[in-house]
Amino acid sequence: MILKQGQIVNNKWRIVYLIKGNPYAESYRVEDESGNPYFMKIYRLKNTPEKLLENGTVREIVWSLFIKHKNIISMIDNGGYKDEEGDCRYLVANYFSGELLSELIQRKGKLTAKRATKIFLEMLQGLQYMHNMKSGCLHNDINPTNVMLSSKTGGTAELIDLGHVSTFFMGTPPFDTADLDPRYASGQSFIGKYDERNDIFAATGVFYTMLTGRAPWDVEFKPDMTRKEKIKLVQKARSEQGEINVDDIKDKKLKAVVSKGLALGYNDRYSCVEEIMLDLIEGDESQTA
């Protein structure tokens, strides 16, 4: 462990407990001087893969400095820490004050069309902000475990985990892909093409899961499967089943949105967030109020 329980970092943050870790980064629950809970992620620079760094610091931290939106988790502090093993960089964000969307789906099975649509629109608003940033910004890891429903704001959806954020690109991903969920990734991402349509595909896949209680194309993974095996299983399911089955979705408008958002053909899908949002709110005054 980089940090110890009870340790004070930079005279600000008291370490409460370790949440999870990997060879180069660890996540902790921390508290400020008043005992308010926060989330800290700290990187051991000497162990951090080069592709995760930018100008000597961690790309996730660089992006988090500029991303400020009500539907995206916000960084409130960042800094450096040094011990006998070398330099570290950390970020601090608001603690998860609610439940993950994946937990809600597990508890409920599936959500009502009204609630699912509200959450989906909030996710899309966060993506719209990211995609329209000056440099163009992609989340690249939209799935039910990366959407938090904040109890502080009455269940507002926030996109979390900015560890895979990038600009649009074609080729080798500038981030670790081992922990990405291929069930919520478009086929284009499997060949290294990441753009707005991949994020929209993933978000629509989450919408499908909210409406049906199932993963897209009913794909389930075994615990010990490699990423390559998972991708092969996803590709097999899509090849055998064809376009996504929306029979369990009763609302005709939502059927059409899901079908287009998860279309297998690149040019058959939504090209931008604004397009899918217009289809969602068309004829629904409650969503535009």
Image (cartoon, rainbow, N blue to C red):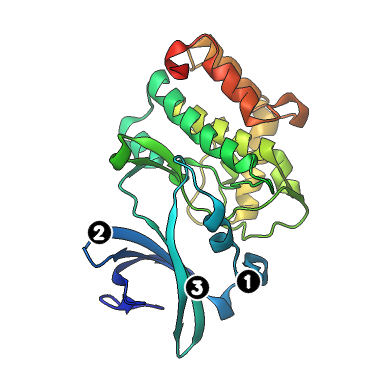
Q: Quadrant of the C terminus?
A: top left
Circle 2 residues within 10 Å: few <14, some 14–19, many ≥20: few
Q: Residue at x 54, y 19 (%)?
A: 280
Amino acid at pointer 3 = Arg
Cα distance in 3D space between marks 3 and 1: 14 Å
Of circles 3 and 1, the one toward us is: 3
Where residue 263 appears, x then y in whole percent? Answer: 68, 26
Q: Is 65 in front, or is 248?
A: 65
Secondary structure beneath label 3 = strand
Cα distance in 3D space between marks 2 and 1: 32 Å
Of circles 2 and 1, the one toward us is: 2
Residue 91 seen: no
Is disc 3 in contact with disc 1, using a CB cutoff of under 8 Å? Answer: no
To which residue does mark 2 refer?
36
Query: Sequence-wise, which precedes: disc 3 or disc 1?
Result: 1
Amino acid at pointer 2 = Asn
Amino acid at pointer 1 = Pro
Secondary structure beneath label 2 = loop
Residue 204 marker: none
Residue 49 marker: 1
Query: Sequence-wise, which precedes: disc 3 or disc 2?
Result: 2
Residue 118 to residue 13: above or below: above
